[in-house]
Structure formats: C-alpha cells, structure tokens
Image (cartoon, rainbow, N blue to C red):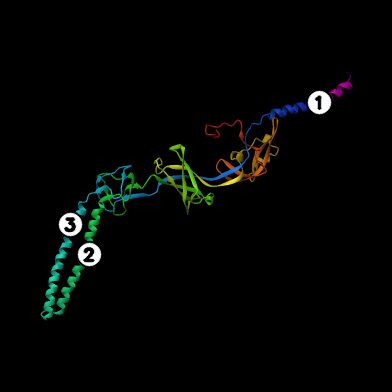
Amino acid sequence: MNATHKKRAAWILLPLLLAGVALLLRHHHRPSDPPFVTKPVLLGTLHRTVTATGRLKAMKTVHVGAQVSGIITRINVDFNSRVTRGEILAQIDPAIYQAQVSQAESNLSKISTKISLDTIQMGRDRDLLAHHIIARSTYDTDRAQFMMDLATKRQLSAALNLARTDLSYTTIRSPIDGVVIARKVQIGQTVTSAFKTPRLFTIVHDLRMMRLDTRVSEADIGGIAPGQQVSFRVPAYPDRLFRGSVTVVRDHPRTVSHVVTYDVLSTVPNPDEALKPGMTATVTIHTGEIKNALTIPNGALVYRPPSRYLQNTHLLRDRKVTYVFLLSGKGAEWSVLPVPVTVGATDGMVSQITGRLSPGERVIVRDKEERTDKRGLLR
C-alpha cells in the first residue's frame, strides 16, 4: 500500500474512531437503564385534606372546688372513680359552721321573743292611748321599736340561712355524673377560699364521646366547615384510625410567633374509652373531593435530577416556576424532560397539577440509589 492509500484509509478510519469514542463516552456518562424511580401521572378523584395536630378533651369538664375554708376530714373518691350527681366526694370539718348556725338560731330566738313582748306592749299602748292616759309620742316610739325589731328579725333570719348554707358547703358533692380524673387534696389538708376557690377534683362527664381540638393555619381554614369528616391517629394506638366530624370552626384567631391559627372542634365517638383526655392526635380533615383530577406524587414536585441529565441547568435555580421531570424514551434512548406545572389541592400524598402532562406518562420521584425504610421514608 502506497502513501496515498494509507492517507486515504486514515481519513476514513478517523471519523469512525471518533464516533466510537463518543459512543463509549456517552455510555459511560449515561447508563442504558435510567437511574430513576418513576411514578405514572394519574387521572382520577382527589380527596382534599388538611393536616394538623390536635388534642383530645372531654365533652364536659367540671372543676369541683370549695366555697368555705376548713380541714378536709374525709375523702370518698380517688382517680378514675365513677360518681353520680349529688354523691359526696369529700367532707370539710363542719364544727365551726355548726357553731355559727347555733349562734344564728339563738339570735333569731331572742329577737322573736322581743317581738312577742313588743306585740303585747303595742296592744297596751293602743288601749291607753284610746283613754288618753299616755301621750301619742309614747305610742309612736313603741311602734317604731316594734318595726325595728321586725327588721332585725329579717336580718337575723338571713344570717341563719347564710350559716346553714355555709354548713352545707362543708360537704363537697359531685355536680354531674362522670369520672374523677384528678384529685388535688388529701385528708388533713386545709383549704382556704378567702381569695380564690381551691380546685379539689376534676370530673369529666362521659368519656364515650370526646372532643378533638385542632389548630388549623390561616392558609387552610377557608376550606373547613362543620359536618366534614375527620380522621386521626394517636401515639398510643399507631395502627388504629379514629374518626369523627367537625362541629365548630371558631372565628377567634390565635397568634403565636406571628403564626395565625384557628380552633376547629370535632366530636369523636369513643365507645370503648380507649382515647384519654390530653392525648395528642395527628389529624386529617377531609374537606372535599375533586373529580377527574390529574395527579402526581408529591415527591415529583421536589425532586431535581443531576445536572448532567439536563440540557438547561438553569432550571435547577429557578424558584418561581414549579417543574416536574418527565422520563421519556425506552432502553438506551431515554431523556429527562422538564415540564412546568401549576400545583393545586393535595391529600398529603399526591397533588393535583395542570400542565403539559398526560395520564400514563411517568414522572421522576427519586434516584434509584436512595434507600427507604420500612415506612417508605427516605433515609
């Protein structure tokens, strides 16, 4: 082979060699199998929800206090005791109040006796006045004394009623049927009600029906209304789903660290009394549904692929537009296509979107090398 033929062969082989090198580099940087986990775009019904945290309370809670001061001499109930309306819970030493009743009765008896004498004197004065034996002023003075004694009797009668009422208050009774969930007094303890009524017991009416208090952010409160269904879980029963319904959406705002929330109250059946007052709940409020909604997993909204798979890397820095990344092609002929979307309602797992996507297309939710735990959460 002469030099001319060698040169011509070199010019023919060079492009082939360069193409082979490019092909090798392409296969080195882009694997034949896409290194992504994808999920399909679905068309269906989206159940709109609002997620928040809440706390369980009894439907009616009564704090039982003492209206008089004294030493606790007897306690008849303890934690978890079931009580009925009027049942005696505790007894305050009644000795002082019994003495006050006796004193008031004695005072009333004295004035009653004096009024009897006044009545007799008034009868005599009328006879004497009729015969002009005494002056009119004497009669008027005796009559005024009689009227003052009647007023004093009424005053002492009120004092006796007050003493008897105070005596009755030494017996602490249950105001409702329910369960004692707190006892804050011991036998021998002195309670003082001079400035503030002491709290002795806390009684809840019925634990078979409970109230769930949930604080919802101002961004989500607009879609919540009475009658909507509520589902929630508590840490004590992680595998059990409890349900209830919204009863009240309070208009009063709560502001903590510039975060505004509103109270949403729900009624929750608790027939087996598994739920306890004070439990913390993770609450989902079902606010409605959207039919024929185009949905994608929420993971697709936050995923960003490595820049080597994108032609326009500036998309990774654009925070004003929400992009999802579509995997197109098959086998070694695949590519990543960014698609701008508008995000709508969500149920916490998937979100409604509008954009240039069709049902059945696959969006990337994460890389294959990312590991998940048993709950499906990324490690």
Please state if 211 lies on the left or on the right of 12 as rendered: left
Quarter of the image for the C terminus: give it.
Answer: top right
At label 1, counting other C-alpha atoms closer than 10 Å, the crowd grade (few under 14, some 14-19, many 20 or more) is: few
Q: Is residue 34 magenta?
A: no
Mark 3 highlights which residue? 102
Question: Which range is magenta?
Answer: 2-13
Mark 1 highlights which residue? 14
Mark 2 highlights which residue? 155
Q: Is the residue 200 above or below the residue 127 in the image?
A: above
Q: Is residue 130 visible?
A: yes
Cα distance, mark 2 to mark 3? 16 Å
Cα distance, mark 1 to mark 2? 125 Å
**Residue at the bottom extreme?**
132
Q: Secondary structure at mark 1?
A: helix
Cα distance, mark 3 to mark 1? 125 Å
- x%, y% of residue 114? 14, 67
Location of residue 298 (image quadrant): top right
Say what amino acid the circle numbered 3 marks: Ser
